[in-house]
Image (cartoon, rainbow, N blue to C red):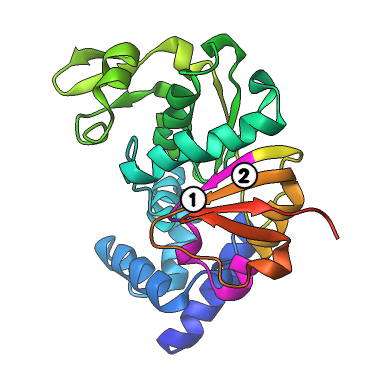
Amino acid sequence: MNTFQDYDLFKKKFYEHSNIDLNLYKEKQMKRRITSLIERYGHKSYISFLSRIKTDPELYDIFINYLTINVSEFYRNPNQWILFEKDVLNGVFKHNNKADIRIWSSACSTGDEPYTAVMILNKYIPLHKIKVLATDIDIGAINKAKAGLYTSRSLKDLPEEYFKKHFTLIGDDTYEISAEVKNCVEFKQLNLLEDPYPQKLDIIICRNVLIYFTEDAKDRIIKKFSQSLNPNGIIFIGSTEQIMNYNQFNIRPIDTFFYQKTDSV
């Protein structure tokens, strides 16, 4: 069996096992990452590696973490978060009671982004009234998010006002986010390509995720995002991303990295 056939069979069998469809990820990039990991663990074929992860839960979790490319930081790309606070939030506040705003961090990784959103919202809303839904396909990343422990590298761009108010040093270069902030976020596992989406949302944060999907998969996700938003709701994407065909999804750009749902047609 040649490598190409082996990889196709691997994708098919992995989907049957995990419900994760690797065909919806950009193949060249994903295949390179998977091959690198397989070789690191001494396997000569994709199928032999699949047999291993089916019986080794720890390696399976490592593989899922590797697939999902968990790179996240608090207040990542600061200018985007400044726009989020000064322009986007103010627009959302005009259409909603502040305490009723529904936010979904749709690929939350280790929690840096939903916690960032909570800290910004806390400038306008008491913490006990803030609720953010945060989801990711990687249960390992979700468990790290729930623990709320971070190094200075993750916090390097976070404004000092947030750092002083919400973090405590508990060890060598380990900072814990406050329980009050953690209590604002509900974490769940969710596969963007397979699972139902939450509904009646005001803001969806999905940053630096769409770039890993095929155009077809990306369109499916954006369509479902739009269907999940309330009128005038916002999609917040990453610095390397753009939605070119926004008209077909009933959304429009309102600033760089931000799209707003238009009136239903």
Q: For the point 58% across and 19% down, which residue is it? A: 130
Which region of the structure is painted magenta? 203-219
Q: For the point 39% across and 34% down, which residue is it? A: 112
Residue where numbered disc 2 is placed:
190
Whole-percent x and y of residue 65? 41, 49
Residue where numbered disc 1 is placed:
55
Residue 263 colored in magenta in the image: no
What whole-number distance in Å separates the C-alpha atoms at marks 2 and 1? 23 Å
**Which amino acid is tagged 1?**
Thr
Q: Kindly give the residue lying farthest to the bottom in the view shown.
A: 2
Element carrying mark 1: helix
**For residue 214, what is the image quadrant?**
bottom right
**Left or right of residue 233, residue 2 in this image:** left
Whole-percent x and y of residue 84? 47, 39
Image position of 35 with respect to 119: above or below: below
**Left or right of residue 244, residue 256 in this image:** left
Element carrying mark 2: loop
Q: For the point 34% across and 36% down, which residue is it? A: 75
